[in-house]
């Protein structure tokens, strides 16, 4: 079997890569794109443009055929209240129809704060045509503060699409025109964009401008710590992360607190600070969404410390989880290694056989998922983790692809439910077909990547079993 040091390097590298760029939006963590992934992202961008065109046509059609149930609202604040009510009641199509029906009111109040909130809502549902027309009108007004706010709103939109060069372009030179809260968020977005663009020094400068009292301060400091980890500056990163953890714990345990512990733990593990890494992992609650990766971390650190029983206990808990995420898969490879270290040859042999059977079974399951070709409506998408769940298998969508694709897909489903026009129904159906085709490519990319991991673990398990067998023969002879 490969050495524990090699396993640690592989697992640490993989898990840290999934945590590297943190913002309030899901972002692509991998800076190196594979050929198939690049092609799929290009297809997603093309579909985004097609969706924008269809959305504009859909709302124009909806207005021309069903005006009886719409109301002219001359008061811009009242219009915003009604729109917010529709959104709160999960009726985004009704909200955007109402905005489209009252564009005259928007243009008559173009400098109102409500207009910017309405534009934000339009962009959240990718109703690009009307949002861009509002942007253009404000740009024509020539008011720098109004234009800065609109550019910030559009920067948020492009961040959801991982279009970081455009985020950086829109935010350039506008920070002083924004409110303190918006400026802080803009610095965070710009710092994330610069990190993605590999301009780490400028990214640190952007993050450093967020004041400690801002709600975005912790995210910015975390990004700075991660930039330090990437460059091998663990001392600075550890100091930053420990300070953030102390501040976060004063406000009560939270999802951010556990994420901080996880990043710190794997950074320390990678640099072989085992005791501190293990302590960091142990602070992560077992009911948090980081629990499985923390249990894997405890297993690795305990093993590295020579505490094979402790490592085995953590990995056994992980193995018994009723999920098919990657840390659970990985536990099957490590457990027989620990039985070897405990000189329990018979149990180690049985565990290797179990791991081989497990990986073979998982590969069959993943091939079955590929053959199943489930449509989007039959797959569960978890917003908090940007993960796709198919038959209890968790696939990390957000590491590789923009969340905007999922949002567009959901909007299309809403169009299908609301629409009563046969010609429009045909266009919606055609675009849904294209989305499903690209969705299948996404599933293939995610599943094939998981299969590559599992095939590697299967090979290592087979090698471990063969090595045990050879060792037992030598002892017999």
Image: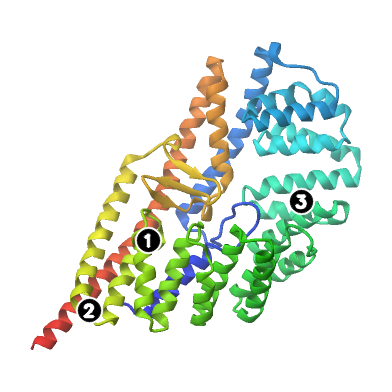
Marks 3 and 1, how far apart at CA: 42 Å
Q: Which of 198 and 466 is in front in this view?
A: 466
Percent of width and height locating residue 302: 42, 78
Q: Name the residue under label 2.
A: 344
The residue wearing badge 3 is 170
Picture layout, residue 38 above or below residue 127: below
Cα separation, mark 3 vs mark 2, equals: 62 Å
Residue 221 at x, y = what percent? 69, 67
Quadrant, the C terminus: bottom left
How many residues crowd around disc 2 within 10 Å: few (fewer than 14), some, or many (20 or more)?
A: few
Can I make out residue 423 in this image? yes
Circle 2: element type: loop
Marks 1 and 2, the one that precedes in the sequence: 1
At mark 3, the secondary structure is: helix
The reply, left or right, for residue 349 in relation to residue 207 is left
What residue does disc 1 label? 328
Residue 469: percent from the left, percent from the top? Answer: 16, 78
Do tag 1 and tag 2 residues touch (Cβ < 8 Å)? no
Lower sequence index among marks 3 and 2? 3
Mark closest to the chain's N terminus, 3 or 1: 3
What is the secondary structure assignment of the residue under circle 1? helix
Binning the other alpha carbons within 10 Å of mark 3 as few (below 14), some (14 to 19) or many (20 upward) gives many
Residue 242 falls in image quadrant: bottom right
Relative horizontal placement of residue 107, taking residue 455 as reference (left or right): right
| Tag 3 and tag 2, C-beta contact below 8 Å | no
Quick check: 185 left or right of 231? Answer: right
């Amino acid at each position: 079997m490969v050495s524990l040091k090699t396993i640690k390097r592989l697992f640490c590298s993989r898990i840290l890569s999934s945590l590297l760029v943190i913002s309030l939006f899901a972002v692509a963590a991998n800076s190196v794109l594979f050929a198939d992934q690049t092609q799929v992202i290009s297809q997603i961008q093309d579909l985004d443009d097609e969706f924008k065109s269809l959305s504009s046509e859909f709302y124009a059609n909806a207005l021309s055929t069903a005006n009886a149930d719409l109301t002219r609202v001359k008061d811009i604040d009242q219009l915003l209240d009604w729109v917010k009510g529709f959104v709160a009641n999960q009726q985004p199509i009704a909200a955007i129809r109402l905005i489209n029906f009252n564009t005259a009111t928007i243009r008559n109040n173009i400098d109102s704060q409500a207009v910017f909130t309405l534009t934000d809502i339009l962009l959240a549902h990718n109703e690009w045509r009307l949002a861009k027309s509002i942007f253009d009108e404000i740009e024509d007004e020539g008011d720098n503060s109004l234009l800065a706010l609109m550019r910030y709103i559009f920067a948020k939109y492009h961040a959801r699409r991982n279009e970081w060069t455009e985020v950086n372009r829109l935010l350039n030179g506008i920070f002083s025109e924004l409110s303190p809260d918006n400026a802080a968020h803009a610095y965070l977005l710009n710092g994330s964009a610069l990190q993605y663009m590999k301009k780490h020094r400028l990214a640190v400068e952007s993050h450093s401008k967020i004041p400690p009292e801002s709600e975005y301060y912790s995210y910015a400091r975390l990004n700075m710590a991660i930039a330090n980890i990437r460059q091998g500056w663990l001392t600075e990163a550890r100091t930053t992360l420990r300070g953030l953890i102390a501040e976060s714990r004063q406000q009560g345990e939270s999802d951010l607190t556990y994420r901080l512990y996880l990043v710190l733990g794997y950074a320390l593990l990678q640099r072989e600070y085992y005791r501190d890494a293990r302590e960091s992992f142990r602070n992560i609650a077992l009911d948090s969404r980081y629990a499985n990766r923390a249990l894997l971390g405890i297993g690795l650190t305990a093993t590295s410390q020579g505490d094979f029983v402790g490592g085995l206990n953590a990995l056994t808990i992980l193995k018994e989880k009723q999920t098919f995420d990657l840390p659970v898969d990985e536990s099957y490879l490590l457990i027989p290694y620990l039985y070897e270290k405990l000189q329990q040859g018979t149990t180690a042999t049985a565990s290797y056989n179990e791991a081989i059977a497990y990986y073979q079974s998982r590969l069959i399951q993943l091939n079955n998922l590929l053959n199943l070709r489930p449509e989007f409506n039959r797959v569960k998408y978890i917003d908090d983790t940007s993960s796709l769940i198919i038959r209890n298998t968790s696939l990390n969508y957000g590491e590789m692809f923009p969340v905007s694709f999922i949002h567009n897909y959901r909007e299309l489903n809403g169009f299908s439910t609301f629409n009563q026009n046969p010609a429009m129904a045909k266009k919606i159906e055609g675009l849904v077909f294209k989305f499903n085709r690209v969705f299948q490519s996404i599933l293939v990319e995610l599943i094939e990547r998981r299969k590559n991991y599992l095939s590697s673990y299967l090979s290592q398990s087979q090698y471990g079993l063969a090595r045990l067998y050879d060792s037992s023969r030598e002892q017999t002879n």
